[in-house]
Amino acid sequence: MDKIFVIFFFTISFQLFATSPKDAFALVKKGKAVLVDVREKDEIKEGMVKGAKWFPLSKIETDPDWKKEFTSFSKGKEVFLYCRSGKRSGKVESVLKKEKIEAENIGGYLELQKVLPIEIP
């Protein structure tokens, strides 16, 4: 019974403290946050969330200097990540946290495009 309560509590807590896509976008518009699209080049042809920075997972995996470039546009701001479905952005979130860069995965483009403005690059 105690294990069920602990699991329920952490599940509810996570949902209460996770930033909604609309709230993340509002912070981006105020200049307090950056929204980062980690999809690959061929995927962004269909569109990106308006104002998002493009920084693909493959760059993090192959460019030894990726961190310098990433922090050049994200330093001092909250970082919100997305990909197609949320899986790769979760992977990038883990990599960033290991590098002491706080970030939050807000999911996938497939869902975000339903609630946030989109632009074609």
Image (cartoon, rainbow, N blue to C red):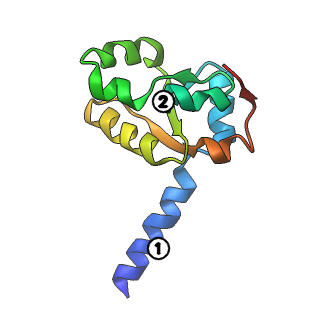
Q: CA distance from mark 2 to mark 1?
A: 36 Å
Q: Where's residue 98, x and y in %? A: 26, 36
Query: 50 left or right of 14?
Result: right
**Residue tagged by mark 2?**
40
Q: Which mark is residue 8?
A: 1
Residue 32, placed above or below residue 112: above
* Residue that appears at 56% across and 32% down: 43
Where is residue 95 drawn, in percent x and y? 31, 36
Which of 16 and 81 lies nearest the eye of the viewer? 81
Is 16 above or below relative to 91? below
Residue beneath the point at 36% across and 23% down: 59
Q: Secondary structure at mark 2?
A: loop
- Mark 1 element type: helix
Q: Residue furthest front?
A: 42
* Circle nearer the N terminus (2, 1): 1
Q: Amino acid at mark 2?
A: Glu
Which amino acid lies under the numbered mark 1 shown in the image of this protein? Phe
Relative to 2, 78 lies left or right: right
